[in-house]
Image: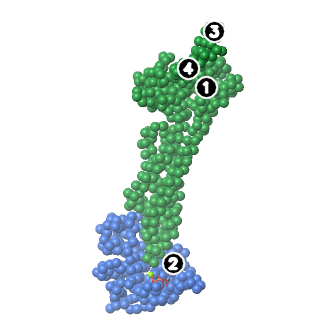
Chain colours: A blue, B green
Amino acid sequence: MEGFGIHIEGLRKRYGEGSAAVDALKDVNMTVAPGEVVGLIGPSGSGKSTLLKCLGAVIEPTAGRMTLGDELIFDDGWKIPDLRAVRRDRIGFIFQAPYLIPFLDVIDNVALLPMLAGQPNDVARRRARDLLEVLDVGHRAGARPSQLSGGEQQRVAIARALANQPPVILADEPTAPLDSERALGVVRILNEMAGQFRTAIIVVTHDEKIIPTFKRIYHIRDGQTFEEKGLGAG
Amino acid sequence: MISLAGRDILHSWSRFVLTGVGLGLLIGVTLTMAGVYRGMVDDARALLNNSGADIWVVQQDTQGPYAESSSIHDDVYRTLRALPGVSRAASVTYLTMQVRRGDTDVRAMVVGFEPGQPGEPGYLVAGRQITRSHYEAVADVKTGFRLGDTLRIRRHDYRVVGLTRRMVSSGGDPMVFIPLKDAQEAQFLKDNDAILGERARTAANPALNRPGVPGLLEALQASQTANRSVNAVLVQVAPGGEPERVAREIRRWKHLQAYTRPQMEEILVSKLIATSARQIGMFLVILAIVSAAIVAFIIYTMTLGKIREIAVLKLIGTRNRTIAGMILQQALGLGLIGFMVGKTAATVWAPFFPKYVLLEPGDAARGLLVVMVICALASTLAIRVALRVDPATAMGA
Ligand SMILES: Nc1ncnc2c1ncn2[C@@H]1O[C@H](COP(=O)(O)OP(=O)(O)O)[C@@H](O)[C@H]1O
Ligand SMILES: [Mg+2]
C-alpha cells in the first residue's frame, strides 16, 4: 500500500452516559489509499453518519486512532488541537446537494477555500479556475450557482472539495438525486480526480446504480465495519 | 480574502436597500426631531440676540416677557435711563395675535417698539425701518407679507415697509413690528362698547361725578381709556459695564424684576423649551428602540435564511470570527445605508416644516455613532444563532 490516505483503527464512539449511553461505533477499521475510491454502505441506524462525522473532524471519537494523510487526528481520546484547520486543509466535502454559497459566484465558491487557508485572492482564483476547467465548468466561472444546472452545480461542488488539495474527500450520497447516467458520470469524475490528485475518497451511498462501480466496499452494521471486494474490481 | 458580507449584500441588494430605506426614513425622522429641538433653541437665542438687550426689566415676580405675561408702567424706562451703567432703555410690548392678511389670518407676535431704540429689528432683508410713528410695520417673511402689503391689527391698517428673516417668538410665530404707541393701543385697547359702558358707570358714580368740580369727570374718563402699560423695558448697558451688577441695582431699588442675557436664556431654553425637549427626548428613545428592533429582526431573519450556508462555511473551515464579522458588517452596512437615506431625507424635508429645523453636523455625527452602536448590538442576536450552528448539520446528519 502506497502513501497515507485514510487510516482508522479500533474507532469507537459512545453518545451519552450511563444507562442512556449508545455505542454508535463499536469497532471501525478502515484504510483508503491515495487515489482510491471506496464505498461505505449500511442500513439505517448502523452508524454511517457518526463515522462520517468522525472522519469529517466535526465530532471526536471516544477511542481509537484516525490518520488523514500524514497527520494523526485522533488517538484514544487525544485530539489534534485545531479540528477546524483539519477540515479546511485535509478534507474535501461533497454532499447530497451541492450546497454552494449562493451569494458567491462560481469561481469564488471554489476559491474561498484557498482564501480561508490564507492564499492571496489571485492565487486562489487561479487555482479555482484550473479546477473548474478540469471539471468542465470553466466557462461558468462568473455565473451565480443559481444560474447553473444541477449537474454543473455538482461539478462545482467537486471542484470546491478539491480546492485545498486535501488528501481526503468525503462524499455523502453524492448521486442520490441524479439519474443513472449522471450518477455514473459523477462516480467517473470522482475516480478521475482520485487518480489525478492522489486523493483518498470515501463515498457513503445507498445508490444501487453506483454500488457495482466500487472496487472495494466497507459495510457497516451495528457500529462495526466489514470489508468486501466490490464488483468494480472486475 | 473576499468580503462575505459585501458579497451577500450585493447578492440580495434589493432586500437590503428596501430595508435600508425603511430604516433610513426612521432615522430621518429622528434627525428631524433633534433638528426641531435645535431649531427651538436657536429661535430662542435669535429672539434674545435680535432684541439687542443686555437686561430685560419686567413686572416683579414674573418671568416675562416671553415666558409669562408682564405688565409695567410705560414711564419706567425713563427712570432706568437715569441709572448708572445704563446706556439705553426702551419700552416694548409683545402680543401674540391673529393679524389679518387679505381674507385670512396669520398668527404672529406683534412687537411694539420705539424706532431707533433697543427692540428695533436688527437686520432687514428688504425695505426700510419704520420712520413714521403710526401705521407702518416691519414683518417677518414667514408671515407671508410682502413690501407694500397692508396688514390689519385690530381696528387699524398698517403698511409693510420692511421685511426681516428668522424673527420668531419662542413659540415659533413670526414677528410683526409696529410703533410702540400703536402696539399699546392694540394690546390694551378696549372696544367701543366697553368704553361707553365704563364711561356710563363712571358718570353714574356720585363720588366721581361731582357737580361742584368741573372737568373731573372728563379727566377721569381720559385716564381710564389711556393706556399706560408696556410688557418690558429693554436695557443696554454702557460699554464696559457689568449687566449683572446693573440688573441687581434695578431689582433692589425699583421693585422690578431684571434678567440678564444668561438668565433670560435659562428661562427660555431650560424652562420654556424643557417640556418640548423631554417630549422630543422621549421620541428619540422610542425611535432608537424601534430602529434597533427592525435591524435585529432583519439581520436575524437574514441569518436564519442562511443557516445551511453558515453550516457549510463552518464545515469547510471558516472561523467563527469570520462568520460573526460577516453578520456584524451586514448590520453596520444596513445602518450606514439607513443613515445616508435618513440624512438625505431630513435635509430634503426640513425646509418644509412650519417651524425652523436646525440640522447640526454634530447631531448627525452623534446620530451616525448611535446608529452604528444600535446596529452592532442588534446583530448580536443573529451572531449568537450563527455561532451555535453545528457544522455537522451541513453533513445532513
Ligand atoms: N447525537 C446522538 N446522540 C445519541 N445517539 C445518537 C446520536 N447520533 C446518533 N445516535 C445513535 O447512534 C446510532 C447510529 O446513528 P447514525 O450514525 O446516525 O446511523 P446512520 O447514519 O447509519 O443511520 C443510532 O442508534 C442513533 O440513534
Ligand atoms: Mg444517517
Residue B127 appearing in the image: no
Most distant residue in the right direction: B252
Q: Chain of mark 4?
A: B
Q: Say what amino acid the circle numbered 1 marks.
A: Ser
Work out how far the residue at label 1 is from the one at label 3, CA to CA, in angstroms: 35 Å
Q: CA distance from mark 3 to mark 4?
A: 21 Å
Tag shown at residue B197: 4
Chain under disc 3: B
Element carrying mark 3: loop
Q: Nearer the viewer, mark 2 or mark 3?
A: 3
Q: Quadrant of the C terminus of chain A?
A: bottom left
Q: Position of residue A72 (x, y in %)?
A: 51, 81
Q: Which mark is residue A59?
A: 2
A69 vs B63: above or below: below
Q: Please state which of residues A69 and A83 is positioned toward the viewer in this rendering.
A: A83
Q: Locate ligand 2 by image quadrant.
A: bottom left
**Image marks 1 and 3: residues in contact by CB distance under 8 Å:** no
User: Quadrant where the N terminus of chain A lies?
Assistant: bottom left
Q: Secondary structure at mark 2?
A: loop
The chain containing the residue under callout 1 comes to B
| Label 4 Cα crowd, 10 Å radius (few <14 / some 14-19 / many 20+) | few
> Residue placed at 65% from the left, 24% from the top?
B241
Q: Residue at x 54, y 24 (%)?
A: B187
Q: Which numbered marker is on residue B71? A: 1
Q: Residue at x 51, y 35 (%)?
A: B172
Amino acid on which the number 4 mark rests in the picture: Gly
N-terminal-most mark, 1 or 4:
1
Q: Position of residue B194 (x, y in %)?
A: 54, 22
Q: Are marks 1 and 4 on the same chain?
A: yes
